[in-house]
Image (tube, rainbow, N blue to C red):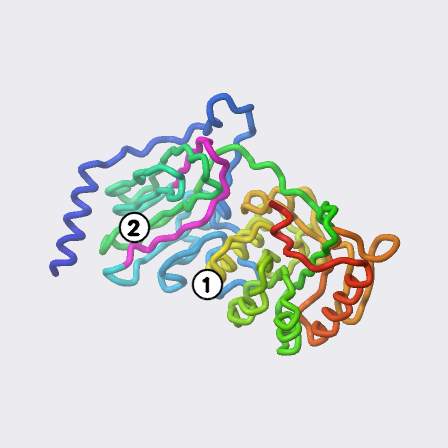
Amino acid sequence: MSTRLSALAASAALLTAFAVPAASADPAPSAPGAPATATVNLATNPGFELPAPSLADWGSIPGWNCTGGPAEAAVTTVAPRSGTSALTVTPASADSTGECAQTVAVQPNTTYTASAWVRGSFVYLGATGTGKDLPPAWTESTRGGWQRLTTRFTTGPAARSVRLYVHGWYQQGPFSVDDVRVDGPAPAPAVAASSIPTTDKVVFFTVDDGWQRTPEAEQFIADHRLPVTTFPLPMPAGTDPGFFKRVTAAPGSSVQDHTVSHSDLSKLPLDQQQVEICDARDTLTRLFGTAPVVFRPPYFASNADTLQAAANCGIRTVLTADADFSWGAANVWHPGPLQPGDVIIMHWTDTLATDLQRALAAADAAGLKPAGLVDYLR
């Protein structure tokens, strides 16, 4: 055994000495003195039963980010703990623990209970970003069966999300996971809006999708230093992240959430809506370094589940628009010209340069200037 692997083995032995017995998860109470709130499971795709959105990366696990990708992690139907599927991870090298993780939106100063059923040797469950050090729950061996790991944490005063993770250990073979839970109070639903309340003489330019990225539109945005809020799908954003970084270089610009697959969310149950929104959030956060806080539903189609799913993904505002300047249009969906706080929708198409010019002229005629959307949501 190499020196490196000897050290890893020694680390495993040390962790064994501090093993925390697995326990059943009780409902997680809210912070002391807080009003009673319904306890729900906040994990995304907790049973690994949900299908991947149509434009998701091949081999991805909906709701989860696995460090080894499809070479290590797969949803299998062999002997799940419940339902029809479970996650099985086979670390591909001596340097991999096969970690899979997801971001869970939480409230500050609130207690949560995380749990998962696992099978294998040296399997760990924990959370980071809680605001306090938190040792993982783990097991040396489940002896071929399923065992429940449980850990409880109270978030710090600044915590808005935590990173829930599960992983194995070096050279300990494959492990399986099923029925993950993060039990805590349900967040308040996101707020639906078509405009931003303000008396400032400003409007907000928003641009969706991202499939057609023209140099003319990029140049127009740069020449006028336009603050643009863009809602790209993860696939075109990942294809050309440099483009989206350049067109959002002006102060007040940002990249926000628009689902993975551009599906009509009103036709999907809450758990699938949560996958669409959370997975897009995760990809855009990885590409651009800032987590989205605004979500635009494709086709403006949404329902009460959309507002809750968005909140479960850490989204504060579900935004439509009250004017459309896409594809040569100039539609304002209220009487009169543009008004302060109006949100204008456009799309990344071959007409966008002229669409932006027409929208800017309409704003000027109304005595309004484009402004940064997120700045007005704070």
When the figure is inspected, residue 219 is found, relative to residue 318, above or below; the finding is: below
Which kind of residue does numbered mark 1 sit on? Gly
Which kind of residue does numbered mark 2 sit on? Gly
**Mark 1 element type:** loop
Mark 2 or mark 1: name the one nearer the start of the chain.
Answer: 1
Name the residue tied to disc 1. Answer: 59
The answer to if 127 sits in the magenta stretch is no
Name the residue tied to disc 2. Answer: 168
Q: Residue at x 43, y 55 (%)?
A: 65
Q: Position of residue 351 (x, y in %)?
A: 72, 75
Tell me, for residue 222, which label it has, or none.
Answer: none
> Looking at the image, which is closer to me, 194 or 116?
194
Q: Which residues are magenta?
A: 96-116
Q: Position of residue 3 (x, y in %)?
A: 11, 58
Q: Quadrant of residue 128?
A: top left
When the figure is inspected, residue 243 is found, relative to residue 84, above or below; the finding is: below
Whether residue 259 is visible here, answered yes or no, is no
Q: Please state if 118 lies on the left or on the right of 227 as rendered.
A: left
Q: Residue at x 67, y 60 (%)?
A: 206
Residue at the extreme top of the image, as rendered: 33
Q: Position of residue 95 (x, y in %)?
A: 25, 60
Whether residue 98 is visible here, answered yes or no, is yes
Q: Position of residue 11 (x, y in %)?
A: 18, 47
